[in-house]
Amino acid sequence: MTELPPSPAVPDCPWSVVNDQRTDEARALRARARTGELRRIAHGRYVPAEAWDRLRPEQRHHVLVRSLVDRIRPRFVVSHLSAAAVLGVPFVHAWPRRVHLLRLGEDARTTNATFVVHADLDPAMRGTVRFRSDGLRVTDLERTAVDLAMTLPFLDAVVALDRLLRSGLDVETVRDGIGRRSVRGRRRALRSLEFADAAADSVGESLARLRLDEYGAPEPVLQRRFRQAGHPDIVVDLWLPGVGVAIEFDGEVKYRDPALRHGGSAEDAVIAEKLREDRLRSFDEVRTVVRFGWSDLWNESAFRGKLRRAHVPMRH
């Protein structure tokens, strides 16, 4: 087993397990679920509704995985998107309702209401990590990367691989792992790996880079740093040097999250961002700045329109 990589803490959402041998406790838990105080997330697993509702989708799947540790057999390892949730790897679509597992060393697949068990398609690649807190075993960065690259569409695979690369993924190990898999899906997986970039600092940046590639726009430089004496550096998300366009992801979290505002108000954050952009535009090589948000990434006409108004060339 490899050394445990940095990963998010278990979300603050305690769960209760129904013990059918203790009928009074089981009955009480089910009664609280009927009133809406608890949420049933799997057979015999309940969580406080208020705590559950505060969690992001990936955190909910993480809690689901952790709540089922006692039901995961010793030869099974948490894998695929379930491993992604535990390791802090993003996924932009709906997280699965069942926990995905890998049956190490066996070519057998099973599915029930709680688990999807995958066959081990590469017994030579047995990398796993174990969490000391509860003994949960999860596929390591490289094995998770191969599984996701081989099973996810190109967009989702790149988003995941960007984060895994940033976490210290060994590219050659992943490339070798993909090479040992079935021909079906291998070409897409290798393309995803080649396209992925550890410099991507957020899901928004990953998606924007994918959209630019899809539109045939110039290849961006990620995390371009602009320096000016006497002032803090400005780092832009994506920079198109040939056309002098800086592209910035305008995620709302930096305005809503007090921790990212460093004690200031949301209004202070907006003003600071405006001053930063004014200074960015003062650099001779910067012709214009394009700002985009989540909605633009899923609205082709909106995002294309912003790029077109900035005179960004697009071949498609």
Image (cartoon, helix red, strand yellow):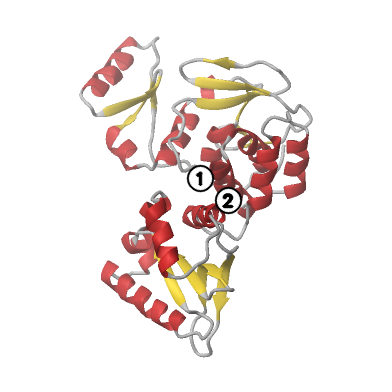
Residue 316 appears in view: yes
Name the side, left or right, on which 226 lies relative to 102. Answer: left
Which quarter of the image is occupied by the N terminus? Answer: top right
Name the side, left or right, on which 179 lies relative to 38. Answer: right
Residue 34 x %, y %:
23, 20
Nearer the N terminus, badge 1 or badge 2? Answer: 1
Question: Which residue is under mark 1?
Answer: 90
Residue at position x 62%, y 16% from top?
A: 109
Q: Quadrant of residue 152?
A: top right
Residue 168 appears in view: no
Question: Which residue is under mark 2?
Answer: 163
Question: Mark 1 Cα within 10 Å, few/some/many (few <14, many 20+)?
Answer: many
Q: Which mark is residue 102?
A: none
**Residue 266 vertical position relative to residue 135 in the rendered view, above or below:** below
Residue 144 x %, y %:
63, 38
Q: Quadrant of residue 117?
A: top right
